[in-house]
Image (cartoon, grey):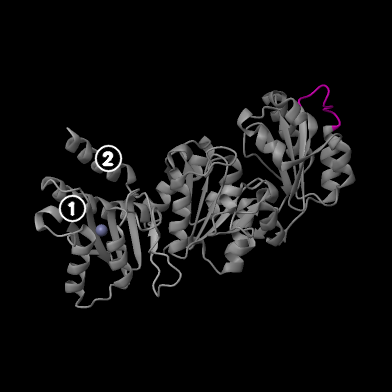
Amino acid sequence: MSVRLIAFDLDNTFLYDADTVSRGNREALEDAAAEHVMTAIASGRVFTSLPAAVLAVPSVEYAITSNGAAIYKLPKEEGRLDENGRFDADRCFTHARCIHRISLPEDRVRAIMKLLEEYPSDRYPVSFETFINGKAYSCEDYIRRPERYGLSPAYIEYVRTTRTMVADMRQFILDHADTLDGLDLQIGDPAVRDEIRSRLMAEVPDIYITASVSNRIEMSNASAGKAAGLRYLMNILGIKKGETAAFGDADNDIDMICAAGTGIAMRNGTPSCRKAADYVTKACREDGFAWAVHGRLGIRNRRAEKEKYMRAALKEAGKAEALDEVPVGCVIVKDGKIIARGYNRRNADRSTLSHAEMTAIRKACCVLGDWRLSGCTMYVTLEPCPMCAGAIVQSRIDRVVIGARSDKSGSAGTVVDLLHTDGFDHQVETEFDVLGDECRKLLSHYFSQKRK
Ligand SMILES: [Zn+2]
């Protein structure tokens, strides 16, 4: 059964730090979307502290937040972008729809706070965070003295910018006891944390207690949890367990990893998380998410494919270099097959028409028996010149993937942009910098040899 829904934890699973998304992980999400696989964030974070870098990926459709206590449907792309086409976090939050919410029962909140009266903050390193309607509130002291509460320095800025700071959190929590999606503690002393955790489990039954990182205790409604969030999505989307996959690294991911058809833990995950998983992927920092999306879930790796075809174009460029021509090579691909190849033979043929792209276009027309090359993608090591760009538009090629830019004659945007000219009846989709370094190196090596 192939996967239709992927739920993924953020911190130490998908994100390198508070808000860094690697190219590999972002592209893996896009690859999933290209195969109509839905993706959902599944985080202990509250909605307004979700990182812009993830929300900006249009293929991420759902967010299970606050450990499953609040689930959001994210807006379509236009609901996430400002008038300049840039991601706008406030706009995204305004247009997101909360489709499921379960608050902590008020009597549980009061019971938790009663127990914590025995741990006054002047004597114990205990700090509070709470989530109300997608917003996070935190103790001022938490960012003033992060080391006291075990907050990693990499997260100070994240906490400062995503929380509303409150001076007296204990009072604030009691004042809002009937509306909390989640109540978290940050405790700098592991022994105190373990003691409070055991006492909460024994003395305040019927709450869900978990942790995303070791200095925290995260509490929500007994029927919350990431697994409950994942099941809720499966239910409304009509997706079976066998069609789901979930990624995580921490103890608050274990129930979700077990609830998914394919549970995947990161190599950097906690021992119990790794034990619960069907499969352990590479570490977060090695793009373990992308690794498993392609390798385990069988989703096509479109970058690897692009690089494969660009390598074939580089091989053609090598043929030009062997003839002492400027090394430019090109292939044309249709339905996953290379149907034509070409390389620069301007001197050999004593013809300016013998550019790599012109040769490949002529051959592709022969193979297809048509001047129209619709459905074709061209991979070329150097940005096309005006002549070749003209031929690309005239032949109705869908897409051109380019290695290096050309400052002297680039006609896909560097000097002029003939591939996206409003008045023309055909526009060509373009992508730059696929194996760009290798393509540039080949050219600069050729010209430095010439100068000797
Ligand atoms: Zn050309």
Mark 2: few, some, or many residues within 10 Å (few <14, many ≥20)? few
Q: Is residue 63 left or right of residue 117?
A: left
Residue at 38% in and 64% down: 419
Q: Mark 2 near ligand 1 (CB under 8 Å)?
A: no
Q: Main secondary structure of the magenta part?
A: loop
State yes or no: residue 122 in magenta. Answer: yes
Residue kind at label 1, given as amino acid type = Glu
Q: Quadrant of the N terminus?
A: bottom left
Residue at 21% in and 75% down: 368
In the rendered image, residue 320, in percent from the top left (x then y), is placed at: 15, 50
Closer to the camera in the image, 175 or 361? 361
In the rendered image, residue 195, in percent from the top left (x then y), is placed at: 73, 28
Q: Quadrant of the C terminus?
A: top left
Q: Which residue is mark 2?
A: 441
Q: Which secondary structure, mark 1? A: helix
In the rendered image, residue 431, in percent from the top left (x then y), is placed at: 39, 56
Q: Which residues are magenta?
A: 117-125
Q: Is residue 177 left or right of residue 91?
A: right
In the rendered image, residue 53, in percent from the top left (x then y), is placed at: 57, 48
Q: Quadrant of residue 184?
A: top right
- In the rendered image, the vertical position of residue 91 relative to residue 180, given as above or below: below
Total number of numbered labels?
Answer: 2
State yes or no: residue 147 in magenta. Answer: no
- In the rendered image, the vertical position of residue 357 relative to residue 449, given as above or below: below
- Residue 417 visible in image: yes
Earlier along the polypeptide chain: callout 1 or callout 2? 1
Q: Which secondary structure, mark 2? A: helix
- Residue 316 shows which numbered tag? 1
In which of the image's four quarters is ligand 1 placed? Answer: bottom left
Residue, far bottom: 370
